[in-house]
Image (cartoon, grey):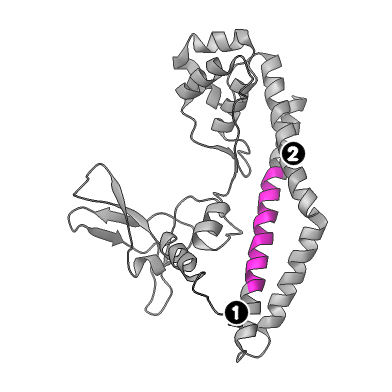
């Protein structure tokens, strides 16, 4: 490498290497809690979409892992990492799956501190036990948790009183076909429309969609030309290839996130026409 790893950088590299390979496993010392552990060989397997075939075997006190499909000697062995967004895969495993059917964009929303009805909204949201709010690929587009939060966020005082008076029915708010007043449904979808427009606007302000496509195509051509070059390249060439791969992944991540948001926006627009 033209820029060798310095001592101040080493601890960061070491920590990131271990943290991205740790896995939670049961322990006999604390049966109700999992502990972080490194699993040699198993953690070297690459991801392929399918089903999870890795489980903790309490009888052997070890990891049990089987192949998703038949494979011959010398062929690469794949496992399924689980239902992850591309954000999780990029941060924790260093790759982007362009055909990830479980991809999503997570939104961070909260109640306003100046909202006089915030305590009632919070009470209803606690009953719903919302863990995450996601914009999903087709055909779902909007997760039930996101939809329920936005519905509660836009409820009037009378509507909150109605739903707080029968908390057992609160789970109905998670469903797309929940019977609600027309004005609340309209405010809900208008809120989602504005929020999605805002998120897409942030992407557009940093890099226009047309420029994003153009840059990605240019990187693909560069990658192709690098592949046709001399295989006995020096360290500078290796570093250039690595940077090229990283730049490509980041653009792919942006493009896939934008696609989810754009598709969801079109869906919300159609809901507003109903």
Would you place residue 153 above or below residue 234 in this image? Answer: above
Q: Is residue 120 among what the camera can see?
A: yes
User: Residue 78 or 119: which is nearer the viewer?
Assistant: 119
Classify the position of the N terminus by image quarter: bottom right
**Magenta residues, as a range?**
243-261
The 10 Å Cα crowd at callout 1, few under 14, some 14 to 19, many 20 or more, is few
How far across and how far down the image is residue 102, in percent? 54, 49
Label count reads: 2
How far across and how far down the image is residue 48, in percent? 48, 62
Name the residue at 60% across, 29% down: 147
- Cα distance, mark 2 to mark 1? 39 Å
| In the image, residue 214 lies in the stretch drawn in magenta | no
Q: Is residue 268 among what the camera can see?
A: no
Q: Which of marks 2 and 1 is in front?
A: 1
User: Residue 239 or 197: which is nearer the viewer?
Assistant: 239
The residue wearing badge 1 is 3
Per the image, label 1 sits on a secondary structure element best described as loop
| In the image, residue 247 lies in the stretch drawn in magenta | yes
Most common SS among magenta residues: helix
How far across and how far down the image is residue 208, in percent? 81, 54
Would you place residue 202 above or below residue 75 in this image? Answer: above
Mark sitting on residue 198: 2
If you read the primary sequence from the N terminus, does the residue marked by circle 2 or circle 1 appear first? 1
Name the residue at 19% across, 49% down: 29
Name the residue at 63% across, 71% down: 245
Mark sitting on residue 58: none
Occupied quadrant, residue 177: top right
């Amino acid at each position: 490498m033209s820029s060798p790893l310095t001592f101040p950088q080493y601890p960061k590299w070491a920590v990131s290497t271990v943290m991205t390979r740790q896995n939670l496993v049961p322990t006999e010392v604390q049966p109700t809690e999992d502990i972080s552990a490194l699993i040699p060989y198993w953690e070297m397997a690459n991801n392929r979409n399918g089903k999870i075939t890795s489980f903790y075997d309490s009888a052997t006190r070890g990891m049990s892992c089987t192949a998703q499909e038949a494979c011959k000697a010398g062929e690469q062995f794949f496992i399924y990492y689980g239902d992850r967004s591309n954000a999780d895969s990029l941060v924790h495993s260093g790759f982007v799956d362009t055909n990830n059917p479980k991809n999503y964009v997570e939104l961070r929303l909260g109640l306003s501190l100046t909202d006089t009805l915030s305590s009632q909204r919070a009470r209803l949201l606690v009953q719903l036990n919302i863990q995450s709010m996601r914009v999903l690929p087709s055909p779902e587009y909007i997760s039930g948790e996101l939809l329920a939060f936005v519905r509660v966020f836009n409820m009037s005082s009378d509507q909150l009183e109605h739903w707080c008076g029968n908390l057992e029915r609160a789970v109905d708010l998670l469903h797309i076909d929940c019977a609600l007043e027309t004005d609340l449904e309209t405010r809900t979808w208008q809120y989602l429309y504005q929020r999605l427009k805002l998120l897409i606007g942030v992407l557009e302000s940093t890099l226009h969609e047309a420029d994003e496509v153009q840059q990605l195509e240019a990187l693909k051509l560069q990658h192709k030309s690098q592949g046709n070059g001399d295989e006995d390249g020096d360290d500078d060439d290796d570093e250039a290839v690595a940077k090229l791969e990283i730049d490509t992944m980041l653009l792919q991540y942006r493009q896939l996130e934008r696609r989810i948001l754009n598709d969801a926006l079109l869906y919300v627009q159609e809901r507003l026409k109903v």
